[in-house]
């Protein structure tokens, strides 16, 4: 096999689009910082593990994927499913037990994806209807919104299903509501939604993130009682095999299969749609192999399962990205 067959990035790089690709990559990397940290917390991990999962899995995907400009990383659906599993098991989000169990879950997901690669399971994706997948993604999105609403109100993220999330929101309003948090969060949300409609090519999300950092650095957040993220350790993560909890193996195997199916189906459908818009086709078997490697890397750095990101891919397209360089 040639280098261009093994590393598709070799055939996509163009001097004409290089500047736009690099600019889009920098913007998406900056946007991925809060997104990945947030989804790591949804999955029950400390925020820093979201950053760890945003380095090596993405490098593997960028080098080996047959898609030209699709973006991979820590994302909503797997994070929400892992968080729901922890809630089902009665494991506290952010606890030492969660930090031990989630990488084990990620490794199990990678092994399931490896099995799907061996048996060419990507062929079943064409039988999944768009409304079903759309409904699933919408349901996951609503769940994550309800989990994050308490943060905007001044409290902590919720866990579990609707029956647990709604009382947590009500309790946050009654016990720890912070007007400054609501103003900051509401303003950021309004700016992002307005910017998406009025100026989609402007990296407004980066500006909003920078403004939040300034508010935290100057002490305004502390002055008005706005919660800040815990400090993140410097340096790259330590690589290690996940600790295997023998008592949890059967539960992890059971729960990791649907997560692997979601990663395969959602990412293949989304990346295939993106490729079709560019007049290209993807190699579904190679893609599943890359998902497997990406999730092995995520497990080794202690992160939750990773998959394709439709929102960040769309952002890259709006910024003019056209190759794996992003």
Image (cartoon, grey):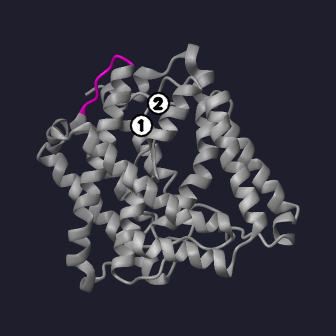
- The boundaries of the magenta stretch are 278-283
Q: Which residue is at 28% across, 24% downward?
A: 281
Give SS at disc 2.
loop
Apparent side of residue 190 relative to residue 67 in the rendered image (left or right): right
Q: Which residue is at 72% across, 70% downward?
A: 227
Classified by dominant secondary structure, the portion drawn in magenta counts as loop
Label 1 Cα crowd, 10 Å radius (few <14 / some 14-19 / many 20+)? some
Indicate whether residue 118 is drawn in magenta.
no
Give SS at disc 1.
helix
Q: Which residue is at 68% across, 45% downward?
A: 190
The label on residue 324 is: 2
Q: Toward the viewer: 321 or 228? A: 228
Question: Residue 279's x, y, as percent?
Answer: 34, 16
Place residue 34 in its image quadrant. bottom right
Residues tagged 1 and 2 counted as in contact (Cβ below 8 A):
yes
Label 2 Cα crowd, 10 Å radius (few <14 / some 14-19 / many 20+)? many
- Disc 1 designates what residue? 63
């Amino acid at each position: 096999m040639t280098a261009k067959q093994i590393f598709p990035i070799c055939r996509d790089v163009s001097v004409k689009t290089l500047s736009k690709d690099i600019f889009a990559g920098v913007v998406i990397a900056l946007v991925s910082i809060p997104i990945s940290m947030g989804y790591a917390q949804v999955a029950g991990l400390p925020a820093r593990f979201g950053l760890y999962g945003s380095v090596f899995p993405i490098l593997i995907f960028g080098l080996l994927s047959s898609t030209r400009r699709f973006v991979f990383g820590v994302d909503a659906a797997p994070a929400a499913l892992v968080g729901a599993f922890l809630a089902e098991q009665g494991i506290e989000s952010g606890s030492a037990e969660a930090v031990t169990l989630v990488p084990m879950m990620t490794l199990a997901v990678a092994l399931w994806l490896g099995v799907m690669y061996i048996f060419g399971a990507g062929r079943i994706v064409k039988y999944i209807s768009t409304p079903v997948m759309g409904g699933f993604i919408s349901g996951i999105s609503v769940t994550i919104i309800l989990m994050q609403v308490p943060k905007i109100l001044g409290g902590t993220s919720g866990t579990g299903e609707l029956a647990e999330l709604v009382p947590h929101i009500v309790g946050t309003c009654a016990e720890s509501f912070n007007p400054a948090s609501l103003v900051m969060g509401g303003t950021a949300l309004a700016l992002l939604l307005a910017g998406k409609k009025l100026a989609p090519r402007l990296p407004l999300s980066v500006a909003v993130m920078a403004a939040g950092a300034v508010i935290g650095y100057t002490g305004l957040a502390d002055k008005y009682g706005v919660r800040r993220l815990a400090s993140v350790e410097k340096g790259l993560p330590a690589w290690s095999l996940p600790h295997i909890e023998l008592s949890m193996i059967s539960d992890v195997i059971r729960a990791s299969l649907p997560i692997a199916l979601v990663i395969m189906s959602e990412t293949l459908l989304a990346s295939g749609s993106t490729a079709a818009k560019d007049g290209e086709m993807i190699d579904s078997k190679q893609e599943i192999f890359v998902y497997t490697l990406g999730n092995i890397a995520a497990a080794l750095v202690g992160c939750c399962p990773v998959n394709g990101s439709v929102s960040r891919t769309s952002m890259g397209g709006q910024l003019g990205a056209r190759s794996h360089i992003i």
